[in-house]
């Protein structure tokens, strides 16, 4: 029997969205813990088939302020050592990159809402991206950006962010954009961060309205990508 997937949730209100639905559809068990209150001593990589790290308001370089981020990075190393699949989303991608020796920096501007995602040359032979549109209108919610380690392969970018998706080894993926987001999660993110969005010139209501139509094609493309990641378990 396949071991459960460990999901590290870094915001109390924002779960795994589409990925959670796909795991349920496929009968894949998962264990979700809140990273900021987890007992990491009881989370051992050998008890799980894969690792998912979700987004949050923290920055990966704020390990002094949020010591649990270092524990999440340690788990990345443990899962990598066992060759088990990892998927990090937004902050989760930054945590993975940081753990691997990459850099996470404050971006020049916030990338919140819908922006084109463009596949890079490295995507041509990637097993998750076979059949993926070369350009996809994608949902984003971040201010920091990733400079992945030299050993990683950059798979996608946007006009504002050079690295939107990277792969390390055969099965560790960092998604800067929110590939896990379905409509319910998008609305939760916007409502959860409404004041923050307004202070940075973004309207939660406007983005939610845009998302009702734009999320359909986005979710369809991500169903294929995330199902292929689940195939790696």
Image: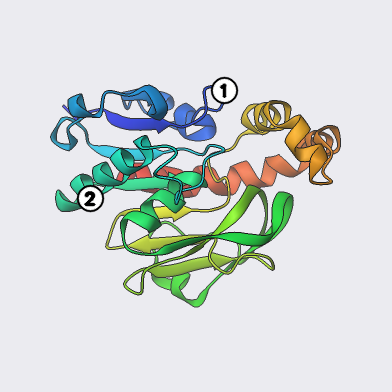
> In which quadrant will I find the N terminus?
top left
The residue beneath circle 2 is 77
Residue 61 lies, with reference to residue 5, above or below; the image says below
Give me the disc on residue 13. 1
Question: Is any atom of residue 115 visible in this view?
Answer: yes
Q: Nearer the viewer, residue 92 or 224?
A: 92
Residue placed at 38% from the left, 32% from the top? 8
Residue placed at 61% from the left, 41% from the top? 219
Question: Which quarter of the figure has residue 203?
Answer: top right
Mark 2 crowdedness (10 Å alpha carbons): few <14, some 14-19, many ≥20:
some
Residue farthest to the bottom?
Answer: 121
Q: Nearer the viewer, residue 156 or 14?
A: 14
Q: Is 175 on the left or on the right of 210, as rendered?
A: left
Sequence-wise, the earlier of marks 2 and 1 is: 1
Question: Which quarter of the figure has residue 44?
Answer: top left
Image coloring type:
rainbow
Q: Nearer the viewer, residue 186 or 23?
A: 186
Element type at marker 2?
helix
Question: Is any atom of residue 232 visible in this view?
Answer: no
Q: CA distance from mark 2 to mark 1?
A: 27 Å
Q: Is 96 on the left or on the right of 223, as rendered?
A: left
> In which quadrant will I find the C terminus?
top left
Residue placed at 49% from the left, 45% from the top? 91
Residue 202 place in picture, x, y as percent = 82, 43
Residue 23 place in picture, x, y as percent = 40, 29
Residue 186 lies, with reference to residue 92, above or below; the image says above
Residue 133 lies, with reference to residue 11, above or below; the image says below
């Amino acid at each position: 029997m396949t071991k459960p997937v460990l999901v590290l949730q870094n915001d109390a209100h924002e779960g795994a969205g589409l990925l959670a639905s796909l795991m349920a559809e496929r009968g894949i068990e998962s264990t979700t813990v809140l990273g900021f209150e987890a007992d990491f001593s009881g989370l051992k990589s050998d008890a799980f088939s894969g690792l998912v790290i979700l987004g949050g308001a923290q920055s990966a370089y704020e390990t002094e302020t949020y010591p649990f981020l270092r524990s999440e990075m340690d788990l990345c190393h443990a899962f990598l050592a066992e060759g088990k699949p990892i998927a990090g989303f937004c902050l989760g991608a930054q945590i993975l990159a940081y753990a691997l020796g990459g850099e996470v920096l404050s971006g020049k501007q916030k990338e919140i809402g819908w922006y084109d995602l463009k596949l890079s040359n490295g995507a041509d032979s990637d097993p998750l991206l076979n059949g993926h549109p070369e350009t996809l209108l994608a949902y984003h919610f971040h201010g920091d950006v990733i400079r992945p380690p030299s050993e990683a392969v950059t798979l996608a970018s946007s006009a504002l962010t050079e690295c939107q998706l990277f792969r390390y080894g055969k099965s560790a993926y960092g998604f800067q954009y929110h590939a896990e987001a379905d409509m319910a999660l998008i609305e939760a993110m916007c409502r959860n961060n409404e004041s923050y969005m307004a202070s940075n010139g973004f309207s939660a209501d406007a983005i939610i309205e845009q998302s009702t139509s734009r999320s359909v094609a986005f979710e369809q493309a991500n169903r294929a990508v995330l199902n292929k990641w689940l195939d790696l378990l």
